[in-house]
Image (cartoon, rainbow, N blue to C red):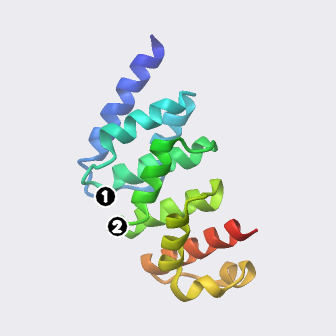
């Protein structure tokens, strides 16, 4: 019964996040941690089905962060969502998807190909070289994370 009320509260928080014009990363992390702390990996799938196409990127980032925080092999629903997020028009959503692949991996050829596209000229750099890069903007952060995900995949 307690889980029911916690899930209901999380749903309301996600709806509220969907109306936000600005958001601090800690708010996304906190909400994502609440989702994971329920201990119900299937609930992330439920949230993806309900909110995965939300127009607000903060909501999409929250779902991706919950996948990453779960530290578990993504379900098929999650894996498909990660692949879709690599093509999101918002760079920070792409970043989050690349971060998941860096952390949890991916065997999808199309994900690896997309990471190569996102990484651009960074894809030829090694881990030490990537660590030394100080991104200037969102696009550079995405390029760096995509390249780091590729390095993780190749190791």
Find the residue positioned furthest to the front.
Answer: 109
Residue 114 position within the rendered picture, expressed as x and y whole percent measured from the top left? 48, 71
Residue denoted by label 2: 90
Classify 130 as above or below 4: below
Helix, strand or loop under label 1: loop
Of labels 2 and 1, earlier in sequence is 1
Classify 81 as above or below 90: above
Residue 52 position within the rendered picture, expressed as x and y whole percent measured from the top left? 34, 46
Residue denoted by label 1: 22
Residue 56 position within the rendered picture, expressed as x and y whole percent measured from the top left? 27, 54
Crowdedness near tag 1: few (<14), some (14–19) or many (≥20) residues, C-alpha within 10 Å: few
Q: Quadrant of residue 12?
A: top left
The quarter in which the C terminus is drawn is bottom right
Q: In whole angstroms, how far apart are the C-alphas of marks 2 and 1? A: 14 Å
Q: In the image, what residue occupies the spot 31% across and 42% down?
A: 51
The quarter in which the N terminus is drawn is top left
Q: In the image, what residue occupies the spot 52% across and 73% down?
A: 113
Q: In which quarter of the image is residue 9?
A: top left
């Amino acid at each position: 019964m307690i889980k029911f009320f916690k899930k209901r509260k999380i749903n309301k928080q996600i709806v509220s996040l969907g109306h936000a014009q600005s958001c601090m990363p800690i708010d996304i992390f906190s909400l994502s941690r609440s989702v994971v702390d329920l201990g119900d990996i299937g609930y992330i799938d439920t949230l993806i089905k309900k909110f995965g196409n939300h127009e607000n990127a903060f909501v999409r980032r929250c779902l991706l962060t919950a996948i990453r925080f779960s530290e578990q092999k993504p379900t098929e629903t999650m894996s498909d969502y990660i692949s879709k997020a690599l093509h999101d028009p918002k760079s920070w959503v792409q970043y989050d998807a690349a971060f998941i692949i860096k952390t949890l991996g991916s065997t999808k050829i199309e994900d690896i190909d997309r990471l190569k596209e996102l990484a651009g000229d960074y894809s030829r750099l090694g881990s030490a070289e990537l660590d030394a890069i100080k991104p200037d903007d969102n696009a550079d952060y995405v390029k760096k994370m995509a390249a780091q995900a590729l390095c993780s995949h190749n190791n």
